[in-house]
Image (cartoon, rainbow, N blue to C red):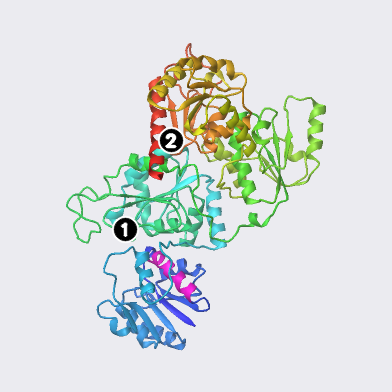
C-alpha cells in the first residue's frame, strides 16, 4: 500500500500534523508513507520514523508555472497511489491529485475542492487545536487515534554531532535559548525585554544565552545587544539548519520565544519552553510538544485573540509582558537547574557506544562539596547501570555516600595521612582497571592508576554553580549528564530508625515537623542564635508544626538554648542521628531552615522546601534555585566576599539580617506547601 500525505507549508503546521502522520502509520504499518511538502519543510519530515519518503512541491520556487506543475503531475502518475490525505486546504493540490488518478482522496470539504475528494469530511463545528484538527479528520474516517496527542521532533546523529561541535567551539556549557524572531512583528517580544531577561538569568544562575534564528533575525539580536549589561550572549542566528536546531535545543536548559516554528521544534525535542502569545491563540496553535511549557498571553483592550484585523496596538502587542514576570515564571518552574526534558529521540553519540564495566569517581573533602558531587554519581549510574562505581572520598564525608546502593566500593583518601598510608590507598585502587576515571578533585590520582579514559586536566568551565561545574566534567569527557533522580542518601532501615527516635520523643509525624540546622561548618556562615530564636518564636505562634533541631554532635550544645523557646514543641536531636537517618528525616519534613551548610545541600538534592541563610558565601555558586527554594541574605556592599574571615570589626552580612525577613520566607514556603496539599485533595 502506498499513501501520499499533502502537508501544509509552515514549520509549526508540519509539527502539528506529525501526530496524525504517526496515526496513519500505526493504522497502516505496512504502507509506504510519502509526504508532499514545501522545500523548507523537507528537513522536519525526512528524519521522522513514520515518513518513508518526501516529495517537494513548492509553488513559490520550482513549481511556480503550470509547465512545471504538469511535469510534477506526470511524475505522480507514474506511481500507483492507493490513498491520499489532504492536510493542506489548497484547491490546486486537490486538483493535481485528482488528475494523478489516486484512488482514495480524503480531506476536509473546504469550499471549491470537495469535488476532487472521494471522502469530503465536514469541518469540525467547534474550534480545535491544530493537532486535534488533523486528528479529528482521521477519527471521522474510522481511524484509531490517541487522545491529547503531542508531537516529537526528530533529527539525525550527524545533526547532533554538528550541534555539539558548534557548542564546543564556542565553549558553551550550560545555557538558555532565546528565539527573537517570528513571521510577523506583533508576535515578537521586544528585544529590550529579552536583554533585561538575559541579565536577570545571568545574575541569578550564571547561564549563558544562545540566540537562534534565521539570518534576517540578526538585526533583532543587534538591537537586543545594545541593552545587555552583564549576560554572555552567543548568536547562532543563520548558522544552523532546522535539524541542527534540534541538537542545539536538546542541550539547552530552557527556551524563551514568541509564537514561532523554532519554538515548536524546541517543544518537540522536549525542551522546557516559555512562549508569548498575543494576536495568535494558544488554544489553537500553542505548543503541544513533549516538553513542559509556560504560555504568557496578553490581549489589549479592544482586541481579541486570534486577531485577523490589519490594525495593531501602537505600543506593540506583547510589550506589556515584563521581563520580571518571565523571570519569575522560569524560577518557579526550576528550569534553570533541573533539566526537565524527555530523552533525546536522536541516535546515540560515540560516547554512548562505550559501555564501561568499572568507573572511578574522585570526590572532594568537605561535606557540602561532596554532596554537590552526588549528581555526577547519579548521572553515571543512570547512564551505565551495569557498571561498578568506585568512589574516592575523604574520611569525614564517607558517611554521606556509604548507604548508596549505586556505589560498589568506597575508598577513603586522607590528604593529611603519612606517605605509607597514601601508598596503601593507591594499592587499594590498583585492585581494578578503570574504563572511566572522573576526577572532581583535580588531583594526580588518575595518572597513578590504570585507566582507559580520564577527565581532562584543562577545564574551561561555563556553569555558574559548583554543582553544575561537577556535571560539566562529564560533558568534557563526551558524556551528556542529565540525572533524572536524586541521590540515595539513606535506606529504608535508616528511615525506620529515625522515626523510632522521633516516637521516643512523642512525635509521631515527621511531615508535621520543621527541621532547623542552626550551625554551619564555619562560624562566618552561621547566623546569630538570637535570630533563630526569634524565627522559632514566630513559627510556633503562626504554625502548628513541631521544631526539630538537627546537626552533628558538636551542634548539640550550640542548639540547646533554642529549646527554651518552647520545650513542648522544640526538640534538640542534634548528634542523635546518623547522617543517613538525618537525611531520612529531611526527606519527609514540612520545611528546612538552615545556614549555607551540608544540611542545605542534602535538603535540596532530595527536593525539600528550604530557606537558606547566606552571608559571606556566594548564593550563585553555592546556592540552588527552584520552586521550593528561598535564599535570605542582607544586601550589603561587601557580600558575598567568599573570604575566610571578615575584614571589618563586625560581620554585618549576618548580624544585620532581620529575623522578620527569615520568618516571612519560611511562612511563604509553608503556605505554598499548604496550597499544594489542598489542590492535591
What residue lies at 39% left-to-right and 87% top-to-bottom? 100
Give coordinates of residue 231: x percent, y percent: 43, 39
**Where is 165 relative to 58, above or below?**
above
Q: Is residue 82 left or right of residue 427?
A: left
Please state which of residues 227 and 201 is positioned toward the viewer in this rendering.
201
**Residue farthest to the top?**
649
Give coordinates of residue 422: x percent, y percent: 78, 30
Classified by dominant secondary structure, the portion drawn in magenta counts as helix
Q: Which residues are magenta?
A: 13-27
The verdict on residue 16 being magenta is yes
The residue under label 2 is: 203
Q: Which mark is residue 624?
A: none
Element carrying mark 1 = helix
Please state which of residues 215 and 642 is positioned toward the viewer in this rendering.
642
Q: Is residue 189 left or right of residue 291?
A: left
Q: Is residue 46 left or right of residue 667?
A: right
Please state which of residues 660 and 472 is positioned toward the viewer in this rendering.
660
The residue under label 1 is: 283
What residue lies at 53% left-to-right and 25% top-to-bottom? 506
Amino acid at each position: 500500500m502506498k499513501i501520499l500525505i499533502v502537508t501544509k507549508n509552515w514549520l509549526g503546521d508540519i509539527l502539528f500534523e506529525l501526530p496524525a502522520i504517526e496515526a496513519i502509520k500505526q493504522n497502516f504499518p505496512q504502507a509506504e508513507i510519502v509526504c508532499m511538502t514545501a522545500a523548507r519543510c523537507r528537513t522536519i519530515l525526512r528524519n521522522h520514523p513514520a515518513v518513508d519518503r518526501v516529495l517537494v512541491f513548492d509553488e513559490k520556487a520550482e513549481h511556480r508555472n503550470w509547465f512545471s506543475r504538469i511535469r510534477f503531475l506526470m511524475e505522480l502518475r507514474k506511481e500507483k497511489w492507493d490513498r491520499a490525505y489532504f492536510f493542506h486546504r489548497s484547491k490546486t493540490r486537490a486538483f493535481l491529485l485528482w488528475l494523478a488518478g489516486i484512488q482514495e482522496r480524503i480531506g476536509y470539504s473546504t469550499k471549491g475542492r470537495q469535488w476532487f475528494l472521494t471522502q469530503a469530511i465536514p469541518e469540525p463545528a467547534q474550534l480545535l487545536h491544530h493537532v486535534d484538527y488533523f486528528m479529528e479528520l482521521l477519527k471521522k474516517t474510522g481511524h484509531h487515534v490517541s487522545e491529547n496527542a503531542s508531537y516529537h521532533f526528530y533529527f539525525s546523529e550527524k545533526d547532533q554531532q554538528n550541534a555539539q561541535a558548534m557548542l564546543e567551539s564556542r565553549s558553551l556549557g550550560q545555557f538558555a535559548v532565546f528565539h527573537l524572531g517570528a513571521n510577523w512583528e506583533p508576535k515578537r517580544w521586544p528585544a529590550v525585554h529579552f536583554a533585561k531577561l538575559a541579565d536577570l538569568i545571568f545574575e541569578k544562575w550564571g547561564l549563558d544565552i544562545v540566540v537562534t534564528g534565521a539570518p534576517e533575525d540578526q538585526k533583532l539580536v543587534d538591537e537586543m545587544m545594545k541593552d545587555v549589561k552583564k549576560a554572555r550572549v552567543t548568536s547562532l542566528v543563520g548558522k544552523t539548519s532546522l535539524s541542527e536546531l534540534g541538537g542545539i535545543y536538546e542541550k539547552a536548559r530552557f527556551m524563551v520565544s514568541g509564537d514561532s516554528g523554532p519554538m515548536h521544534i524546541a517543544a518537540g525535542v522536549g525542551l522546557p519552553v516559555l512562549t508569548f502569545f498575543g494576536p495568535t491563540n494558544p488554544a489553537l496553535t500553542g505548543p503541544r510538544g513533549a516538553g513542559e511549557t509556560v504560555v504568557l498571553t496578553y490581549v489589549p483592550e479592544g482586541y481579541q485573540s486570534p486577531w485577523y484585523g490589519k490594525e495593531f496596538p501602537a505600543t506593540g502587542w506583547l510589550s506589556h509582558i515584563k521581563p520580571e514576570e518571565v523571570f519569575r515564571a522560569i524560577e518557579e518552574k526550576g528550569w534553570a537547574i533541573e533539566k526537565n526534558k524527555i530523552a533525546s529521540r536522536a541516535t546515540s553519540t560515540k560516547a554512548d557506544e562505550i559501555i564501561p564495566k568499572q568507573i572511578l569517581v574522585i570526590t572532594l573533602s568537605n561535606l557540602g562539596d561532596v554532596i554537590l558531587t552526588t549528581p555526577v554519581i547519579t548521572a553515571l549510574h543512570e547512564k551505565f547501570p551495569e557498571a561498578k562505581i568506585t568512589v574516592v572520598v575523604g574520611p569525614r564525608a564517607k558517611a554521606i555516600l556509604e548507604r548508596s546502593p549505586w556505589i560498589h566500593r568506597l575508598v577513603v583518601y586522607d590528604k593529611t595521612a603519612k606517605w605509607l598510608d597514601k601508598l596503601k590507598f593507591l594499592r587499594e585502587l590498583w585492585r581494578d582497571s578503570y574504563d572511566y576515571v572522573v576526577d572532581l578533585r583535580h588531583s594526580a590520582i588518575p595518572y597513578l592508576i590504570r585507566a582507559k579514559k580520564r577527565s581532562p586536566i584543562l577545564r574551561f568551565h561555563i556553569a555558574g554553580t559548583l554543582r553544575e561545574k561537577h556535571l560539566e566534567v562529564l560533558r568534557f569527557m563526551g558524556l551528556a549528564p542529565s540525572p533524572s533522580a536524586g541521590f540515595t542518601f539513606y535506606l529504608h532501615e535508616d528511615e525506620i530508625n529515625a522515626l523510632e527516635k522521633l516516637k521516643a520523643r512523642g512525635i509521631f509525624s515527621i511531615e508535621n515537623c520543621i527541621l532547623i540546622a542552626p550551625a554551619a561548618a564555619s562560624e562566618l556562615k552561621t547566623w546569630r542564635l538570637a535570630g533563630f530564636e526569634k524565627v522559632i518564636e514566630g513559627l510556633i505562634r503562626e504554625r502548628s508544626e513541631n521544631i526539630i533541631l538537627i546537626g552533628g554532635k558538636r551542634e548539640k550544645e550550640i542548639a540547646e538554648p533554642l529549646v527554651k523557646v518552647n520545650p513542648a514543641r522544640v526538640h534538640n536531636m542534634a548528634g542523635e542521628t546518623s547522617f543517613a537517618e538525618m537525611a531520612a528525616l529531611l526527606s519527609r519534613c514540612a520545611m528546612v531552615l538552615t545556614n549555607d551548610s551540608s544540611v542545605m545541600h542534602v535538603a535540596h538534592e532530595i527536593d525539600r522546601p528550604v530557606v537558606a541563610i547566606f552571608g559571606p558565601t556566594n548564593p550563585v555558586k553555592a546556592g540552588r534555585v527552584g520552586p521550593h527554594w528561598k535564599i535570605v541574605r542582607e544586601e550589603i556592599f561587601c557580600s558575598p566576599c567568599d573570604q575566610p574571615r571578615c575584614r571589618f570589626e563586625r560581620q554585618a552580612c549576618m548580624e544585620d539580617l532581620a529575623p522578620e525577613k527569615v520568618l516571612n520566607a519560611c511562612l511563604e514556603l509553608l503556605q505554598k506547601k499548604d496550597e499544594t496539599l489542598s489542590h492535591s485533595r
